[in-house]
Image (tube, grey):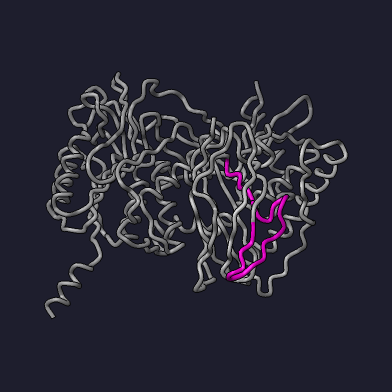
Amino acid sequence: MIAALAFCAVQAPPTLRALLVGTTKYADKSGIVAPRGVSEDILRMRAVCRAYGQVVPSVLSGPAATLEGIQEGLDRVAKEAKPGDVCLFYFSGKGSGKAGAPSLVAADGTLNSDANDLTITALTTWAKAVEAAGAKPVMVIDACWPLAVDLAKGQTKEFHPYDETPRSVARGKAVEGPAYTGPGVMLSAGSAKGRTYDWQITEDTWSGAFTDLVGQSVVAAGLRSEPLSLATIFRNVQRTADEYREAGYIPDLYPQLTGDGETPLMGRAPSLTQTGELGRILTVEKERATKYRVAFNVDLPGGTPEDKNALYLQVRGGLREKLGSGISIVLKGARPDAILTIRKKQDEVYVELPRDEIRGGSPPMAYPLAAPDPMVAWLQRQSLFLRLFRVLDAGTPTLTTSSAIKTTLPTSVVIPEGTKVGLSAEVTPPVPGVALVLDRGTALNVVHLYTPQFTNSAVLGGPEKPVKVGGEGWNFSPDVVGSHEWRMLVVDGTDLKLPPLPPTYVRPKGTLNDEQRAAQRSARTAFDAAIVPYLTTLLDAVESGKSRWTGLVLPYTVTVQR
């Protein structure tokens, strides 16, 4: 009996002990303006704590978030720590520097003095005390450090709403180097080369961009019932930051992870609720999963705000009905999936699509508003690709089998500089059906469909029946490096009736002559036309529950061999 009790004690789940700090307001004479999204950040992190079992975390905000208050809160967490616990320190506010090292500006901090900054040395001391108690110290910081070129203006444009003031306090000195080198794990929004900002999440609500993305990662893991590590959160934030930075939506967001963050938080998946802050995030993420959201820049040199707004309304009115129910035009405050640019040349209005990596990194494509069909078709394809890609985020798998998906998809890809690459993998779906391999890299939410592909027909297979999937990696070019993600979606083929796809096109070897190039264009046009009804039918079968599905997510990296 004693032995059994001892075993149960050892196997007890870890306890989360959290201190959440948000500098929602600095003193009136401090010279510091608090970030706009701190209050929302605290709500979101409280929801994250609830998802991991701590219903009432310790919170310091407003005037209570002084240096003394923070130090007392840290001491309390360290003293209460027990072996196996996870001790979380979260900070939302401004970062700066003290004695040449990164620091966090408490609510009683000022622009001209670092006396009330929390130093990284103090956090290191706290982390050592937590570690000595047998617990794991974890720090999540939504702040950044002043850079050599500080307070540089960002790329604020219509419908790209973020506050261009970074979350840092410049006191005449740049702060460089890693934010933390002590025990435990630190995930921070800022790094030696990056800043972090606040952005709008609704028309009326602001949040720290970094904390918002952290919350999205937790929701996605909860929807999939998968354990989540800080390293996975870091990769998710990094990937999305890459996309938004490429689009000019938000600049310079380079998160940083120090320490071993691969261990799943609390050893389990987060538990989601339909109420409170997690319920609100959940609602937003489900809406995002079923809509492809398009926003516009208006590039009208010399035009007045009234001129730009009139041009925007003209384009919106001309496209809204053509785009269909799966695509929505979003206004200020909603982060878009695609950002289009409206231009006017003489009397003709054009809409310019983002650079298209699918077509080999081609320049932006501009289409006249009077003849928008090719642009609408491109958006419809991207909508379907991205919505299928997101099924694994916002959906709950309905297909359970005893056999897992087996694949040889690589975890790293090396590309010779300036060349394209063919990609293929052997896949064994767990049931007869359709397997889609999708990839999203650092281009602005441009999702690449590997199967069925312009060079590949639909994949049909089943247990112990491996099939080859793949196609030409048109999206791979020397400037698309870093974190990518394979996603494989497997849909049960029982009673699944899909529209036909054209025969597989096989590109002749060598340089193509005029006749062969014409045949290639014809095959591509046929595929582009057929893939929309094909994927529409498949997506409807998945979203409506008519067909069971499952899948996997596999991060990988791309490097260029020079």
Is 173 magenta? The answer is no
Q: Give the extent of the magenta segment.
A: 444-468
Quadrant where the C terminus is found in the figure: top right
Query: Can residue 548 be seen here?
Result: no
Vertical comparison of 320 with 493: above or below = above
Q: Nearer the viewer, residue 230 or 44?
A: 230
Quadrant where the N terminus is found in the figure: bottom left
Vertical comparison of 180 with 400: above or below = above
Hey, which quadrant is residue 206 in on the image? top left
Measured as percent of width and height from the top left, residue 372 is found at: 77, 42
Vertical comparison of 96 with 16: above or below = above
Q: Main secondary structure of the magenta part?
A: loop
- Left or right, 82 with reference to 33: left
Measured as percent of width and height from the top left, residue 311 is found at: 69, 34
Q: Nearer the viewer, residue 393 or 24?
A: 393
Query: Can residue 48 be seen here?
Result: yes
Measured as percent of width and height from the top left, residue 513 is found at: 85, 36
Residue with the most extreme top position = 172
